[in-house]
Each structure stands twice: as C-alpha cells, then as structure tokens.
C-alpha cells in the first residue's frame, strides 16, 4: 500500500506541511493521461455550465483519504509470469464493488452515451472516499454491513451543513454527515439517488445504488468525460478542492493501467476516518492488514579490487507487446448504403462498421461511439445524438435507427473507436423535403368576388403521396397569366403580406398534419375577368384554380 500522506485533507487547511508533501508526490506521479485543466490559479475551483453548483457538492466538501497509489504501475493478471494471480494489493478491487462500477458505466452508456463515463473514474472516487467500501465489506446485494459515515459537518474543522434528512440516512438530526461508499450528503442523495441493483430502493449504503448515482452526478449537464476539462469539472463538483482532484486523478490513471478483481472483504482497508465511523467487518471474515516486509540484511563488504558479493538485482521481464491479432487498428465501413430520408421519416439504411486488427481481421468487444454532427435535428432512436455500442463476435456493430427531423440538407455521422486516437469513419446523410405527388381542392365551390372586394370563400387543398396523407409538404401559390408559358400576373386577384402590401406569389406554405392547406384571404382589384391561381408542391404536384372577378348581378 502506498505511504499515507495524512489521513484527511480538511477544507481550508491545504497549506499545511502534510498537504504540501501530498501535492508534491501527486504532481510527481502524474502520468500522461492525467493532465489537469488549470483554472489559472491555486485553491479550489468552481464548476461551470449546467452541472451541479458549488452549493450542491455531492460530499458537502467533507474530508477524504489522501493515500496515493503505488508509483509502480500494476500489471494485469496474466501479462507477467512473475505476477501472482491476485496481483498487487492496491490494484485489486473487491468483486461486488468492481461489478457495481462496471454496471453503472453500462447503464449510463445506454442513457447518456455522450458523457463517456469510464468505470475507472468511479473506482478512483470510491477509493478516495471510502477505500472501495472499506475493502469490499458488503453483503450479497452490495450493501455495507454497517453504514459508512463521514465526520459530523458541524463547522468545526469541516463544512457546516445542518441536518436535511432528520437523521434518516446519517443518524444525525442536528447536522449532516456524508454517507455510504461514495460519501453522498443526504441532501444531494435526495436529488441524485439511484436504484442501481433493481431492488426497488435507493440506498446510499449500497454500492450499486451509490455508484450509479455518482455516475449520473458526474455526467450532469453536457459533460463529456473523455475531455480532460470536463472530467476535471466533474471531479471538482464532487469535492471542491484541487488536492482532491489530483488525488482522484492519480488513482484514475493508476486503475486505467491495470486492475483486477479480489474477493469481497479482502481489499485494502484504509485507516478509520477522522471523526467518522469504521463499519464492522463481514461476520465470519477477519481481513488483516498486510504485514510490513522484513528489512533486508546489510550488504556484504566489497571484495578487494572492487568486486562485490551482492547478487545483481533482478530485472522484471518486459511486458510483451500485444499480438497483432489483438491490436485494434481502427474501424471501417461494413457495407453502409446511401443515407437519405424524407423530413420526419426514419432512414431505411443504418450505419454499420467493423473493428479490425493489425492483420485486417475482425475484433470483437470493441467499443464504438456513433455521433451526429452538423446543422440538423436528426437523431438516433430515442432522441440521442451520440451512442456507444460494442462490436459483436464478427467484429461489426450497427448504430440505432436514424430518425430525420424537419431540417433539410446534409449532415455527418461519425463512427470512432471509443477513447482511441484512431481515424473515424465518416458518412454523409441527407434529409430531403417532404413530397406530394397529388394536390386537389377539398370542395368545388365557384370562387368569385366583386371588383375591389375580397373572395368570400377560402381556398383549401389537400396533398397526398402515393395515396397517403402528405403532411408538412411545402406549397407555392402563384397568380399566373394565361398562355402556354404562364408567368406571375401583374393584375387581378392578389394576396397581402404581413405589411399589407400586394403580393401575387406566396412561398413557405406547408400542409398540416392532415395534409390540408388553407390559403390566406384573396383580394380582387378593379379589373374584372377570369384569372388563374396555381399551387405547386415539393415533388411537382400541381393544381390550377379558377378565380372570377365580376360585378354582382343587378
């Protein structure tokens, strides 16, 4: 287990020598994948956008563990012949706890794929907040044997948060305390609590419920946790401290490099919380801390002439590179046809890609993210503009049905291996305007008006396409001249625009949900005669209507 640089950091006390050592060590151990989004200064950061505000931090800015991960990156089980099957103590995560993190990731991937929540982030926060539910001391349903409670938030060294749950979760009816493996304060749990194990309850002491709630909290607003700045904001919204962010980031980077499952109740148990409670261990088990290693004897004196009797230090065998058949080379089109649809309709074709390895073969279980981009209101089934799915045994994966909106024109669908710096496959999709192949009047009344008057009867038409109602179809109405090449007339009946001006052509007309369209009022000028009104739909359907201007009979 990594050396402890102080059991807790308290808000407002980060300038102590203990905190300084912790931050220095954390800074030294940051890997390439743990770049922090700077706020331009020291101290705590505030979140932005529609994510939870500073006043609604998940933990209430309660204290947290500052244990650091080992400086040696863990190997995954099976990647080194010298590594025991149980691996290093710190890289092991209790089975139920690990299952809860992965289940939360899968759940949010289906409900908010654009967030791209990695389960390793939940594991990092769970490690810092509770030591993975105190080493995995949970029952078969994932509930801790005793509540995990943080210190009383009474303002004495910690934040001041008065009771919000009448002690229902934390047993304190005067002040709040952070509760459970993910250390939610009761007021935050009331808003973000989830039922992650489908037992009909939302229990902050259940690792499945708490992990799913933490995932939703981190994904609040429009965050994309694959973006460093969004991930930093999410972690800071959990606890507003740069030291907290660095600690979580360090564990996040550590878990991304390798971890494995250990039995419940056998995980590394951190020291008791300052002012918090240490739940009783699982009855029947008694996990004990790892005994300290025995000191090695002093090296023997060197032989005359500079020789040494010390054996040469053993060098661990290098981790073999992944086989070409297991190396993801990218994704490619798997036979997707032309993507075209009429406004409001579903695309008949679906985007399909194949993940391939370095040898050109197929790769299963590769995460692929499909994203819609461009000026469009088209969406995947369910109203989503991004979806993450895994390839099947044949290496292919098909995106959900694509639904066209009302915006016509072209947009782009991208498919990319999730979290990989590999080329994306890009598709151009086209939404065409709704069409009609027939249009006709809904009645046959004669349309007449006296010179200078308005036509008493309205003009109403109905459009159809292949015999079915054609709703939302664009229609153009024009007063036309007679002859073989009719043009817009400059006399006779007319419309009025919004400013009351005379116009003889109307555009941007559309049929309603029933395929019908009622034209605005038509007015007659002082010239008597018979005139023609032409209506043309998107799709080329046309109807010509006769209008008569004559003085009334004596």
Image (cartoon, helix red, strand yellow):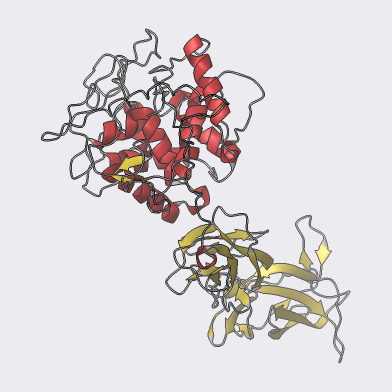
Which residue is nearer to you in this view: 126 or 176? Answer: 126
Place of residue 254 in the rendered image (x, y in percent of width and height, measured from the top left): 47, 38
| Farthest-out residue, bottom | 484
Relative to 120, is 112 above or below?
Answer: below
Residue 183 in percent (x, y) is at 34, 29
Residue 10 in percent (x, y) is at: 43, 14
Q: Is residue 223 left or right of residue 66?
A: right
Res 493 → quadrant: bottom right
Q: Residue at x 83, y 71 (%)?
A: 525
503 versus 256 height, above or below: below
Q: Quadrant of residue 541?
A: bottom right
Identify the residue at horizontal 65%, vertical 20% (top origin): 41
Q: Nearer the viewer, residue 481 or 326?
A: 326
How many discs appear? 0
Looking at the rendered image, the quarter that the C terminus falls into is bottom right
Residue 552 in view? yes
Q: Quadrant of the N terminus?
A: top left
Which residue is nearer to you in this view: 307 or 512?
307
Vertical placement of 1 versus 337: above or below? above
Q: Is residue 520 visible?
A: no
Q: Is residue 267 left or right of residue 462?
A: left
| Outermost residue, front side | 304
Q: Quadrant location of residue 353?
A: bottom right
In the shown orientation, is residue 139 left or right of residue 119? left
Residue at the farthest left position: 284
Q: Give the percent coordinates (x, y) of residue 513.
A: 53, 70
Return the residue nearer the eye: 251 or 115: 251
Residue at 69% across, 85% down: 543
């Amino acid at each position: 287990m990594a050396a402890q640089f102080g059991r807790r950091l308290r808000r407002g006390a980060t300038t102590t020598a203990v905190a300084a050592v912790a931050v220095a060590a954390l800074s030294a151990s940051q890997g390439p994948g743990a770049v922090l989004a700077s706020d331009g200064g020291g101290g705590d950061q505030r979140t932005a956008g529609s994510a939870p505000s500073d006043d609604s931090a998940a933990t209430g800015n309660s204290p947290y563990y500052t244990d650091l991960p080992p400086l040696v990156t863990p190997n995954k089980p099976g990647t080194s012949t010298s590594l025991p099957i149980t691996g290093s103590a710190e890289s092991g995560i209790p089975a139920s706890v690990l299952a809860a993190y992965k289940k939360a990731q899968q759940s949010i991937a289906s409900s908010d794929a654009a967030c791209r929540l990695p389960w390793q982030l939940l594991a990092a926060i769970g490690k810092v907040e509770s030591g993975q539910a105190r080493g995995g001391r949970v029952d078969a349903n994932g509930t801790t044997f005793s509540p995990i409670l943080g210190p009383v938030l009474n303002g004495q060294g910690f934040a001041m948060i008065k009771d919000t749950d009448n002690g229902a979760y934390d047993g304190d009816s005067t002040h709040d305390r952070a509760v459970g493996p993910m250390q939610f304060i009761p007021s935050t749990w009331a808003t973000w609590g989830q039922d992650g194990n489908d037992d009909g309850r939302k229990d902050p002491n259940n690792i499945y419920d708490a992990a799913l709630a933490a995932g939703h909290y981190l994904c609040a607003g429009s965050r994309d946790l694959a973006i460093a700045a969004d991930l930093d904001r999410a972690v800071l919204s959990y606890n507003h401290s740069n030291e907290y962010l660095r600690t979580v980031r360090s564990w996040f980077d550590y878990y991304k490099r390798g971890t494995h499952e250990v039995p419940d109740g056998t995980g590394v148990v951190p020291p008791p919380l300052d002012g918090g409670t240490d739940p009783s261990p699982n009855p029947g088990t008694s996990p004990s801390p790892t005994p300290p290693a025995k000191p090695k004897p002093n090296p023997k004196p060197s032989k005359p002439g500079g020789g040494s009797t010390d054996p040469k230090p053993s060098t661990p065998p290098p981790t073999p590179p992944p086989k070409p058949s297991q190396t993801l080379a990218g994704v490619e089109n798997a036979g997707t046809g032309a993507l075209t649809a009429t406004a409001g309709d579903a695309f008949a074709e679906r985007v399909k890609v194949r993940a391939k390895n370095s040898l050109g073969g197929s790769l299963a279980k590769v995460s692929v993210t499909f994203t819609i981009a461009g000026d469009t209101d088209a969406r995947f089934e369910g109203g989503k503009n991004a979806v993450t799915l895994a390839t099947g045994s044949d290496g292919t994966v098909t995106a959900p049905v694509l639904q066209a909106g009302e915006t016509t024109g072209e947009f782009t669908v991208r498919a990319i291996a999730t979290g990989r710096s590999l080329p994306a496959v890009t598709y151009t999709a086209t939404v065409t305007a709704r069409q009609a192949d027939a249009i006709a009047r809904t009645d046959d009344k004669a349309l007449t008006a006296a010179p200078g008057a308005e036509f008493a009867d309205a003009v109403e038409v109905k459009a159809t396409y292949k015999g079915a109602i054609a709703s939302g179809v664009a229609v153009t109405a024009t007063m036309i001249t007679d002859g073989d090449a009719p043009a817009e007339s400059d006399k006779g009946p007319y419309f009025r625009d919004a400013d009351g001006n005379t116009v003889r052509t109307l555009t941007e007309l559309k049929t309603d949900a029933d395929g019908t369209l009622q034209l605005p009022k038509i007015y007659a000028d002082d010239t008597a005669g018979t005139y023609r009104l032409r209506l043309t739909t998107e799709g080329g359907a046309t109807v010509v209507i006769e209008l008569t201007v004559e003085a009334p009979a004596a």
